[in-house]
Image: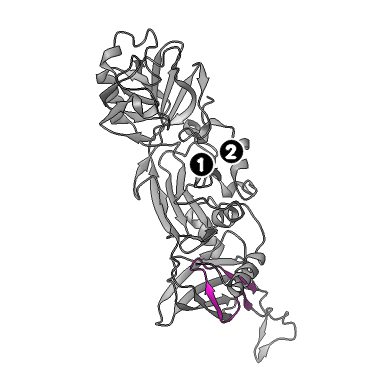
Amino acid sequence: MRFTPSSLKAYAMLRDARTSRRSVIVAGSAAVLAGCTTDGKSPQSSGQGPGGPSASTGPSAPPVTAQITAPADGAANLPAAMEVAVTVANANKTEVVFLDAAGGRIAAVPHQVPGSWVPAQQLQYGTAYQAQVTATGADGTTATASTSFTTMKKPGNLAKVTTVVADGQTVGVAMPFIINFGVDVAKDQRAAVQQRLSVVSEPPQEGAWNWFTPKEVHFRPKDYWQPGTRLTLRASLGGMPIGGKWYAEKDLTVALTVGRLFLMEVENRTHQLTVTQDGQVVKTIPVSNGRPGHPSASGHMMIMIKNEWEWFDSSSFGVPSDSKDGYRLKVYWPQRLTWDGEYFHSAPWSVGDQGKRNVSHGCTNLSPANAEWLWKQTLIGDPVIIRNTEEHVKWGNGWTDWDVPWEQYVKGSAVPYQPPASPSASASPSASASAAPSA
């Protein structure tokens, strides 16, 4: 289903009313809530004589005003991913709500574009709503405005919106938020989609979005997340046009907790894996990396997927399993680092080579005991750095968010990145997580 000309015009008017700003707010809850209330105070009259206001009474407070500039009253066939453009004056508190015909109430939250508000939960398709704004002045006086609109019928072409982590999961300090779409998001829609994505961190930390592919967008902080950080992602996308005939299927909300600072560093020259936790070395493990012709990749990666065992089959990348260089075997304690098949895993067949020479097909081989120990310590999103091999990991071959400098990473944003305006917008990282080590 496509927009009608009238609905496209209404949606465009709403979009054109907004001004651009940085693509993502990364702040603590208090800072986000502050977006709903201004701190300005209206002048108050001073001095009361016995018979009422004295002749020296100051000017009265300017009137509070409120207006909804979009959508137009009576607009129809609008996306369920609605935005309401609001203008208020002389108010120190603003509240916006959506009401359905049955009196159901849905709170609105400030959009990342100043003056716009979005519903805190997905609106229903084919439903009439009224949006109301109430502005309250410092003296308690209020002004209200409202507009009515109807959302479009449920479209037949809905694209899935998913993420790789589970709500409530504990993750490593390098873990990005990753949103996957079932279809490509059109280039001219990515900025609008990105502006519907919000990440809140407690404590506040600076971060940015990067479009890895037309179907995949990531969010990472400037430095590793501080251990213990609480994270919330809200993607207000349900019913939003994302290009061509496609609409995003649903809103998405995920809350995460960041674990301890657990870092794995492989030095190819010494064939050693050094494991540190919160800055302290906890174990040094002999390893064997990729042999000549099948080198392991250097770079800054992270633990992506963990399984107790997997079948490794060389025919999956074009080498027959029954050929000289082929194999098919059950491998224990695998932890994936790249999409093309680089892992940490148990390799009992190479224990005699571990710590001495490289004999693998590209993975990092560990003894069974060391592989099991490491597997039981790690979290998805724990950082891994491999140094001094014959080749470097390619961008996007896994979660390579940390393999480029911050100044380059922010260029992947669909909205020009702007750093926080003041120290209150981002927290100073702790000494243990002040920066990601250089790969």
**Residue at x 27% of width, y 25% of height:** 373
The disc labelled 2 sits on which kind of residue? Answer: Tyr
Can residue 96 be seen by looking at this rendering? yes
User: Relative to 166, does residue 60 appear above or below in the rendering?
Assistant: below
- Determine which quarter of the picture holds residue 362: top left
Q: Which sits earlier in the primary sequence, circle 2 or circle 1? A: 1
Residue 95 lies in the magenta stretch: no
Q: Position of residue 421 (x, y in %)?
A: 64, 49
Q: Are marks 2 and 1 in contact (CB under 8 Å)?
A: yes
The disc labelled 1 sits on which kind of residue? Answer: Arg
165 lies left or right of 376:
right
Q: Nearer the viewer, mark 2 or mark 1?
A: 2
Q: Position of residue 177 (x, y in %)?
A: 46, 45
How far is mark 2 from mark 1, CA to CA? 9 Å
Residue 220, disc? 1
Count of numbered tags: 2
**Residue at x 61% of width, y 60% of height:** 113
**Residue at x 44% of width, y 39% of height:** 175
Please state the extent of the stretch shown in magenta in the rendering.
Answer: 66-89
Q: Position of residue 38 (x, y in %)?
A: 59, 66
Q: Looking at this view, is 249 or 318 the one in front?
A: 318
Can residue 435 be seen by looking at this rendering? no
236 lies left or right of 418:
left
Q: Mark 1: which secondary structure?
A: strand
User: Relative to 406, does residue 110 appear above or below in the rendering?
Assistant: below
Q: Which residue is mark 2?
A: 409
Q: Mark 2: which secondary structure?
A: helix
Q: Position of residue 114 (x, y in %)?
A: 62, 62
